[in-house]
Image (cartoon, grey):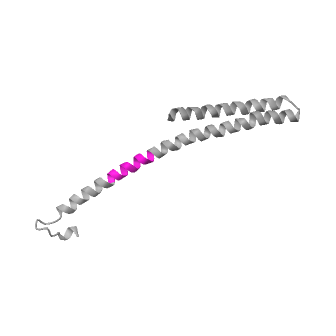
Amino acid sequence: MKFRRSLLGWLLVAAGLVAVIAGWSSVQSTRDVPVQVAYLASGGLIGVALVILGVGLVGGDDLHAIRAAVEELRDRFDDLEFDLADSRGHLDGSASRQDGTRTRSSV
């Protein structure tokens, strides 16, 4: 699913660039201003819209991957924090005497 969305985004970017280039070459080939405006509207604006849509799809896919990596790091940090608290608890427990009183070094 993620690969399809990213692939669709890149295809839209490519199609948008082709539309912009086709519109530009059509505008360059004529000197009639109303025809140039029509080519600009059909090729240029639609091409820019396709590029923006494609970049949005690719960027959204990248953000999803970044969010997943952050969640993985957060889980690792939580595990590390739990292990550290557990090992600290073992150290504090070993510093007490058998009668339940604490030694001076552990206070």
Relative to 102, 69 lies left or right: right
Task: Name, please, the residue furthest toward the left.
Answer: 99
Q: Where's the C terminus, which quadrant?
A: bottom left
Tell me the magenta residue range. Answer: 69-80
Observer-nearest of 94 and 14: 14
Say which quarter of the image contains residue 5: top right
Task: Name, please, the residue furthest toward the front.
Answer: 1
Question: Is residue 79 highlighted in magenta?
Answer: yes
Q: Where residue 105 sits in the image (x, y, percent)? A: 20, 68
For the point 17% across and 61% down, the residue is: 94
Q: How many marks?
A: 0
Q: Where residue 62 sits in the image (x, y, percent)? A: 53, 41
Say which quarter of the image contains residue 82: bottom left
Query: Is residue 71 shown above or below 7?
Result: below
Question: Is residue 52 highlighted in magenta?
Answer: no
Observer-nearest of 99 and 35: 35
Task: Look at the magenta stretch and give its main secondary structure.
Answer: helix
Q: Where residue 52 sits in the image (x, y, percent)? A: 65, 40
Query: Is residue 43 shown above or below 62?
Result: above
For the point 53% across and 32% down, the residue is: 4
Relative to 75, 46 lies left or right: right
Observer-nearest of 49 and 21: 49
Observer-nearest of 13 and 28: 13
